[in-house]
Amino acid sequence: MIPDDGMGHRIQTCGGTIAATVLGSGPPLLLLHGFPQTGAMWRPVAESLAGSHTLVIPDLPGYGDSQPPANAEAASKRAMAASMIDVMETLGFPSFDVAGHDRGGRVAYRMALDHPVRVRRLAVLDILPTSDYWAKMDRDFALKIYHWAFLAQPAPMPETLIGGAPDFWLEWTLKSWTQSQSLDCFPAASMAAYRLNFTDPVRLRAMCDDYRAGATVDLDHDLASRASGDRIEAPTLVLWGDSGIAGSAETPLDVWSDWCHDLRGEAIPSGHFLPEENPTATATALSRFFA
């Protein structure tokens, strides 16, 4: 799903076997995808970034070809971050830059909080911290991200309902989060990978466990970090779609300034899926920050 010159790896980690593609040369840059996608989402920007970085592009646990977590607690962003650190350590990268979109951004900022010596620089794409999303869940925002509460319901309710019409649910979700309200920005090969997440009951359950963790253990970890005054030490770039999800809650930099010591950011003309909807602007912003 990534450019043909990439090398595929299957890496044993504390959270199970992780599938990852490695390509390019230069300083290491870990790229983490979000829901409802796989590492294939980075394909439109990978070629631009691979000229100056060694890209490590995994499937998160339970997505794509990576082993699903055992339960919701094992799907916490803290646990996923530990698995990603094992991936990078195995590949010979004890410290690295990281960019994460959507759920991958949550893994990335938790990694920066829990393992500051590992993360050199951090970029998060179209998200606010998990605890801030829950705190802002008024009527308008709940309608925008209804899936947070729906996917977090006890098993097997959401899995069963989505499993009755998986293609419809996936396509509706993707279209509703794009600026064009269409699937035009998603390459056919990427769409095929995303569909596999929804036709496999094990992976469908794992994705729901990801959101169950978001409503429980991930929220607890965020609140504990805020209570103890933890802040992200790594220089941080925040990118958001000017018609995406994060920007609909509040100016993202206003929120992230409470979490980060060294912060910058900008809006990208896009919906939620910045690398696929506007790869040129997204790659330019990431390349400039990680230069």
Image (cartoon, rainbow, N blue to C red):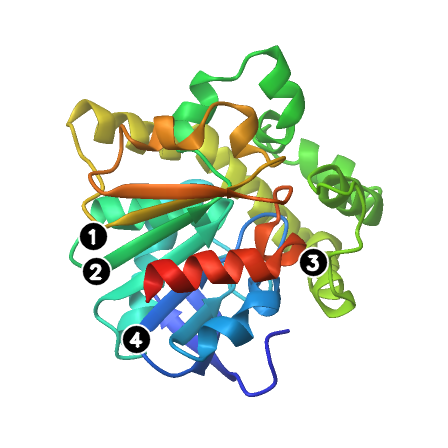
Q: Earlier in the sequence, mark 4 or mark 2?
A: 4
247 vs 177, nearest the viewer: 247
How far, Cα to Cα, is label 4 from label 2? 13 Å
Task: Give coordinates of residue 100: x percent, y percent.
Answer: 44, 53
Q: Is the residue 21 above or below the residue 187 in the image? A: below
Residue 268 in which image quadrant: top right
Q: Earlier in the sequence, mark 4 or mark 1?
A: 4
Circle 3: element type: helix
Amino acid type, callout 3? Tyr
Residue that mark 4 sits on: 27
Residue that mark 3 sits on: 194
Q: Residues within 10 Å of mark 2 (few under 14, many from 20)?
A: many
- In the displayed structure, does residue 209 sit left or right of residue 123? right
Amino acid type, callout 4? Pro
Q: Residue furthest top?
A: 139
Residue 77 in which image quadrant: top left
Residue that mark 2 sits on: 118
Q: Residues within 10 Å of mark 4 (few under 14, many from 20)?
A: some
Amino acid type, callout 1? His
Q: Nearer the viewer, mark 3 or mark 4?
A: 4
How far, Cα to Cα, is label 3 from label 4? 29 Å
